[in-house]
Structures are given as C-alpha cells and as structure tokens.
Amino acid sequence: MAKNTVLTLAKQVAEGQKVTMVTSYDYTMASIVEAAGINMILVGDSLGMTMLGYDDTIPVTMDDMVHHTRAVTRATSDTFVVGDMPFMSYQLGVEQALANAGRLMKEGGCQAVKLEGGVRCAPQIHTIVEAGIPVVGHVGMTPQSANSFGGFKVQGKSTENAQRIVDDALAVEEAGAFAVVLECVPRDLAEFITSKLTHCFTIGIGAGAGCDGQVLVAQDLLGMTPGGFKPKFVRQFAQVGDAMRQAYVDYAEAVQSGEFPAFENGFKMDPEVMDQIRRNN
C-alpha cells in the first residue's frame, strides 16, 4: 500500500474513490488495520468507552490520547493516523489548542489532529493549521458536547439545527481543515454538505453513503461491543467478540483437562543434565 498523505487522500476523493477510516487504539489492532490497507486510522477519544470503560468521552485526558496514539503510530507506516483532541484540550482558546495539538503530533506521532465543533472552534482550527498541523473537523452529533443536546441523538432534523450543521461544516473548511467528520446527521443533509465543500472532504459515520468516506469504531464493525449493543448506522462485518470468547473458553478447558500444554508445546533438555540435577538434589 502506498503511503497515505493529505495530498493523496484529496486526490483519491477527487478521482471519485471513497476514503476508508476506522478507529484503533493499540499496536496490535493498528498493525492489522495497516495490513488491511485502510486509508486512515482515527485514534478517537472513544477509547474512553471502548478501552477504559468510561460511560462517555468526557474523562479522557491528553495523557491518555498521547499514550494510545503513540502505540498506534508505532505500528503504522502507510496508514494516515489522526489523533483526537479530548474534551477541554482546546476549548479554552487558541494557545491551549495549539499547545495540545503540537503535543499530540510531537509525542503521539500522528499526522493530523481532530477537533469537535464548527463555528465556535474555527479560530482554534485556523491557528493549528497555520502552525503546519493538518486538522480534521467534526460536526453534527459531537460526543464531547452531547450533554448540551440531550445525549447521543441524530442532529439536523429541524431547519434551524440543519442550518447550524451546514454553517459549522463551512466554517471548518474556511478555517483550513482538510476533512470533516459528519456524525449522525440525515443522509440528505450530509450529501448536501459534501456537495457544498470544495477543498475539504467529508467522512461520514451514521451520515449515509453520500459522504466522501466512512469511519466506524473498530469494536462496532468487528462485533466486539460488550452487551451486544449495535447502533443503527453500524454493520458488523465479523463476530470477533464471539470468536475471542470461545477461544478463551477452549483455552480454559484445555488447561483444566491437561490437554494443554501438549508435549510439542514444551522444551527439551539434555537427559544427562537432568540426571545431574536429580543426583544433586
């Protein structure tokens, strides 16, 4: 696979090819994603729920994001890695935003950062881009501010709400972002926004097929979500959770029955050495 960059991704979209993106939070999973030829990895603050067991993304820290981003970038050479800016890492102003974006790039090793919000964080996006750090925007249902609109709900169904999302997407593009995530918005609205943006491509999640690319949380698409919860917009392409669970069951049974480890799983030694040990003890 050729190395993915801001320029190659834009060229891919211009040629009518969809961009693929998934989340990843650790070295092993990122290695598999890289081998699969996925264009982009998002080290999302969703790790708060998928990896750390929080109820939402709010508790995730910059230290968390740097730690997991660095693990992912150790595994990737061709996949374009985007590091998520966690809650309250950029909301206080442009100086805070630039410092934390720089840290995520420098210590995490990612190729871009992602910020939630449109009009309200356009100054932060502009400042970060001006410093030479590529930015992915995120509008629509923004998990970090989900409490302000009543939880994880589809956004953009009313005229006022839909216009806000359009304005946010345009502001993100104007500020210099090269891509924007559209999350949980009606498919027609997402397709309209995609058509209005001229130098910023769209990545949908729960936003229909009219976006320039798609992103899913790895645990969702792999069927690894605890409790089996599956959002409407998710397709499970495998049941990895069931396969893993059965492997653990089989392992435990093999250990308890004495079947594992078998003779071929052990190491041999010189019989004379063993005889000497027995004589000495």
Image (cartoon, rainbow, N blue to C red):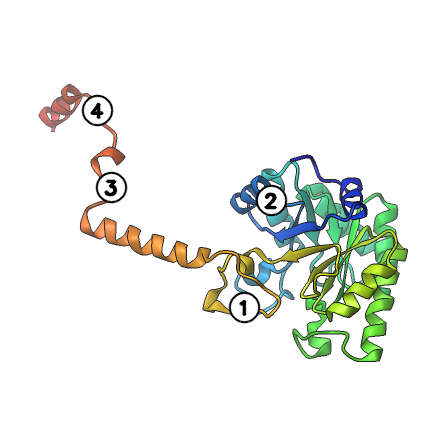
> Three-letter amino acid code at disc 1?
Lys
> Three-letter amino acid code at disc 4?
Met
| Disc number placed over residue 230 in the picture, else none | 1
Q: Earlier in the sequence, mark 4 or mark 2?
A: 2
Q: Earlier in the sequence, mark 3 or mark 1?
A: 1
Q: CA distance from mark 2 to mark 1?
A: 25 Å
| Disc number placed over residue 261 in the picture, else none | 3
Q: CA distance from mark 3 to mark 2?
A: 32 Å
| Front residue of 222 and 99 | 222
> Three-letter amino acid code at disc 2?
Val
Instruction: Please tell me how many numbered marks the rendered image carries.
Output: 4
Report the residue marked by disc 2.
Answer: 72
User: From this viewpoint, which residue is outermost toward the left?
Assistant: 279
Q: Earlier in the sequence, mark 3 or mark 2?
A: 2
Q: Earlier in the sequence, mark 2 or mark 1?
A: 2
When asked about the image quadrant of residue 141, the answer is bottom right
Q: CA distance from mark 1 to mark 4?
A: 52 Å
User: From this viewpoint, which residue is outermost toward the right?
Assistant: 174
Q: Earlier in the sequence, mark 4 or mark 3?
A: 3
Q: Quadrant of the N terminus?
A: top right
User: Residue 188 placed where, x, y %?
Assistant: 77, 69
| Disc number placed over residue 269 in the picture, else none | 4
Q: CA distance from mark 3 to mark 1?
A: 37 Å
Say whether marks 4 and 3 touch (CB < 8 Å). Answer: no
Of circles 2 and 1, the one toward us is: 1
